[in-house]
Amino acid sequence: MGNSDGPPSYPVTDAICPFYIEKHSRVQTSFGISLHLVVDLDSDCRNQSPGILSEADTVAENPPVMPTKIAVVYYSMYGHIRQIALEVKKGLESAGCEVTFLKVPETLPDEVLAKMGAPGIGAEDEVATADKLTEYDGIMFGIPTRFGMAAAQMKAFMDSTGGLWQKGALVGKPAGIFFSTGTQNGGQETTALTFLTQLTHHGMVFVPLGYTNPIMFDLKEPHGGSPYGCGTLAGADGSRQPSDIEKELAVTHGSHFGKIAAKLTAK
Ligand SMILES: Cc1cc2nc3c(=O)[nH]c(=O)nc-3n(C[C@H](O)[C@H](O)[C@H](O)COP(=O)(O)O)c2cc1C
């Protein structure tokens, strides 16, 4: 067993055959010590000596995997955006992300909300603040359309992020957009396009839906969603609910975003 010129070599047995070692890197010796074997698989195994790694070395090789943290920052007056957010969350989680919903603060007075029949969606979610955004690796923005662009509540929230912009705190973070309109041509593209100025000024990396799911080409029924992001059609009176196609696109956008966010934030 001893070797006067170098590290000790051990008799070759089945236990240190490379093919066995690939599956069983820890081997119990006959004298009771657990060895972590390191063998150069390109060389003749008969000339190799096993190395011994400490527990610390082994941990360094396999650091704990931290999930990619994604915030879904949204506003939803009647619930359509929040329903799509739940599907986006499924997609993000399928890509191994940890998801937090942050609802942007309301800007309308209660009496106006009452006149608009707003039921108070998302009371269970954390309220978004600018500072919280820095805690996340990526952000997906859920936005209902107002006159072809983002609702003022979302714009007001973005106006509160000037301090982050000064510090470049969001630079390089991936960002996605999803939306809800009353009608088919009411802003499924313009809501995202006009919101791109926000992401651009922050130096964020836009992750669109693209045509990553062939159902995008399906014309058998009207549906929300565009290459800019997933989306839903609420109907002129808000009574329409997200369809199966829209939900599927939302899951696709979430998982696509999650995979890209994980690559961008890989340590
Ligand atoms: C003031 C106002 C303006 C709106 N402008 C548009 C519009 O330009 N295009 C459109 O399709 N829907 C428009 N809508 C309908 C909203 O987009 C719809 O209520 C919303 O997408 C529903 O999402 P939510 O349930 O998450 O609030 C408007 C609604 C309001 C109250």
Image (cartoon, grey):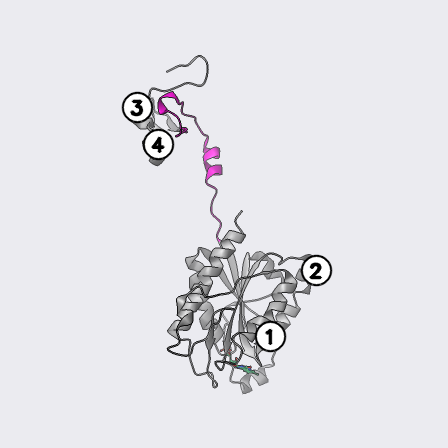
The residue under label 4 is 21
Hey, which quadrant is residue 30 in on the image? top left
57 above or below 139? above
Locate residue 199, reporting x and y percent. Answer: 61, 64
**Relative to 238, does residue 24 appear above or below in the rendering?**
above
Residue at the spot of label 3: 13
- Measuring from the top left, give residue 192's x and y in whole percent: 56, 71
Looking at the rendering, the stretch of residues picked out in magenta corresponds to 38-67
The foreground one among 97 and 210 is: 210
**Above or below, 48 relative to 97:** above
Mark 2 vs mark 1: which is more N-terminal? 1
Q: Which of the 4 quarters of the picture holds residue 148?
A: bottom right
Considering only order in the chain, which callout, 4 or 2, is on the residue closer to the N terminus? 4
Q: Quadrant of the N terminus?
A: top left
**Residue sitting nearer the eye, 223 or 6:** 223
Chain-order first, disc 3 or disc 1: 3
- Residue at 41% across, 71% down: 217
Which disc number belongs to residue 153?
1
Q: Between marks 4 and 3, how big is the CA–CA gap?
A: 11 Å
Secondary-structure class at tag 1: helix
Residue type beneath disc 1? Gln
Secondary element under disc 3, as helix, strand or loop, is loop
Q: Nearer the viewer, mark 2 or mark 1?
A: 2
| Residue 78 visible in the current orientation | yes
Q: Say which amino acid is labelled 3.
A: Thr
Residue labelled with disc 2: 166
Q: Please tell me in which quadrant of the rendered image residue 168 appears.
A: bottom right
